[in-house]
């Protein structure tokens, strides 16, 4: 049996021709790509409206796993004072100028600076846990931001 390769795929919903890089919802091309970007977005919105709580639970679980992965990679404790309660731990920067390098593509169109939260954790994992970032508790991180140093550094 000889299989024919199809060079032109069409969207299953609207019938428009799918072109790599033009109207495909993902940046990579697969055999399972059956919908244009607009139809894919509409189908996702429909699914989210029908499965609202399930969608929220999936997202919450993903964010929690991502944060735990980052905390584990940086030692699960504050690099300054040793605080180990996960509720207090945040991401700190060794050099403030390094924040300029942390950008993410939003939807593939715009570049915006990462402020924190899930996009920051995703950026850290994607860039293989950079050395200029460390784990700090909220108090140490805020003290460094306000006063330029942490009181724990003077105690040593």
Image (cartoon, rainbow, N blue to C red):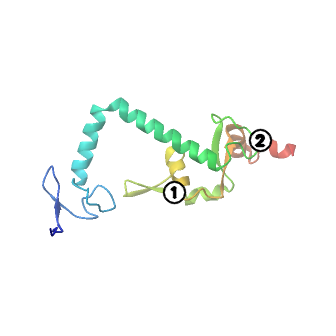
Q: Is residue 58 above or below residue 119?
A: above
Residue 130 coordinates in the image, percent (x, y): 61, 58
Residue 109 is left or right of residue 130, and the answer is: left
Residue 125 is left or right of residue 81, and the answer is: left
Which residue is identified by label 1?
126
Residue 81's disc is 2
State whether residue 148 appears in this view: yes
Q: Residue at left 21%, top 54%?
A: 34
Between 53 and 155, the residue placed more toward the observer is: 53
Could you classify mark 2 by the number of other residues whose Cα lies within 10 Å: few (under 14), some (14-19), or many (20 or more)? Answer: some
Residue 142's disc is none
Residue 156 coordinates in the image, percent (x, y): 87, 46
Q: Residue furthest front?
A: 1
Q: Residue at left 81%, top 46%?
A: 153
Location of the N terminus by quadrant is bottom left
Q: Quadrant of residue 98?
A: bottom right
Q: Secondary structure at mark 2?
A: loop
Question: Who comes first in sequence, dot 1 or dot 2?
Answer: 2
Between 155 and 122, the residue placed more toward the observer is: 122
Q: Residue at left 76%, top 45%?
A: 80
Q: Secondary structure at mark 1?
A: helix
Q: Is residue 101 above or below residue 43?
A: below
Q: Quadrant of residue 154?
A: top right
Residue 56 coordinates in the image, percent (x, y): 40, 34
């Amino acid at each position: 049996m000889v299989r024919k390769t199809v060079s032109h795929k069409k969207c299953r919903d609207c019938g428009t021709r799918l072109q790599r890089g033009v109207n495909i919802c993902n940046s990579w091309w697969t055999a399972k790509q059956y919908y244009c970007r607009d139809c894919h977005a509409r189908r996702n919105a429909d699914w989210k409206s029908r499965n609202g709580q399930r969608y929220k639970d999936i997202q919450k679980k993903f964010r929690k796993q991502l944060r735990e992965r980052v905390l584990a990679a940086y030692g699960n404790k504050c690099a300054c004072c040793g605080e180990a309660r996960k509720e207090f731990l945040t991401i700190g920067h060794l050099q403030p100028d390094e924040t300029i390098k942390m950008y993410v593509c939003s939807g593939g169109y715009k570049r915006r600076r990462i402020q924190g939260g899930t996009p920051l954790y995703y950026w850290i994992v994607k860039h293989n846990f950079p050395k200029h970032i460390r784990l700090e508790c909220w108090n140490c991180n805020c003290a460094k931001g306000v006063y330029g140093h942490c009181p724990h550094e003077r105690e040593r």
